[in-house]
Image (tube, rainbow, N blue to C red):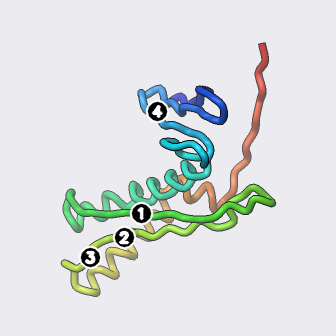
Amino acid sequence: MTELWVQRTGSRRYVGNSSRGATVQIGGEDVDGVFTPGELLKIALAGCTGMASDVSLARRLGDDYDATVRVSGAADRESETYPALDEVFELDLSELDPDAAQRLLAVVQRAVDRTCTVGRTLKAGTQVSLTINTD
């Protein structure tokens, strides 16, 4: 299993790490060149949607198809939650006839609903526990 951790690098600045060698810069909205934790949550959702649909789309459109998944949603600062996240999946299906395009969109929706772990977790809610270790 991949290990994940964040390391503090400065005031409200962290680096997210994985044991596979990936890193991501994390910080507040006032810091250039970083993602906020909320932005990473949204990117995880959009990335999961794209990846969940990738095989179905590549099978029908070819491995070099273009896709963009945009995600947005404002935080409710009173409750410190994102009450709604909106995704827009941008695909060029102009080479398909309308019936084939509709069938493919149905397959994509089923694939995302069935295999996007991030989206499924957000919809279902999840239990989070925090343990604080001290020296």
Judge whether 34 appears above or below 48 on screen.
above
Q: Residues within 10 Å of mark 4 (few under 14, many from 20)?
A: some
For marks 1 and 4, give the CA distance: 22 Å
For marks 4 and 3, give the CA distance: 34 Å
For marks 2 and 4, give the CA distance: 27 Å
- Does residue 84 appear to the left or right of 34 in the view shown? right
Q: Earlier in the sequence, mark 2 or mark 4?
A: 4
Check disc 4 and give the amino acid type: Thr
Give the residue displayed 36% in from the left and 63% down from the top. 68
Provide the residue designation for mark 4: 23
Give the residue displayed 55% in from the left and 59% down from the top. 119
Q: Earlier in the sequence, mark 1 or mark 4?
A: 4
Q: Residues within 10 Å of mark 2 (few under 14, many from 20)?
A: few
Check disc 3 and give the amino acid type: Leu
- Does residue 124 appear to the left or right of 25 in the view shown? right
Number of the label disc, if any, that sits on residue 69: 1
Q: Label 2's element?
A: strand
Q: Are marks 1 and 4 in contact (CB under 8 Å)?
A: no
Provide the residue designation for mark 2: 90
Number of the label disc, if any, that sits on residue 55: none
| Quadrant housing residue 7 | top right
Give the residue displayed 59% in from the left and 46% down from the top. 36
- Does residue 38 appear to the left or right of 61 in the view shown? right
For marks 1 and 3, give the CA distance: 15 Å
Foreground: 125 or 12? 12
Provide the residue designation for mark 3: 93
Q: Earlier in the sequence, mark 2 or mark 1?
A: 1
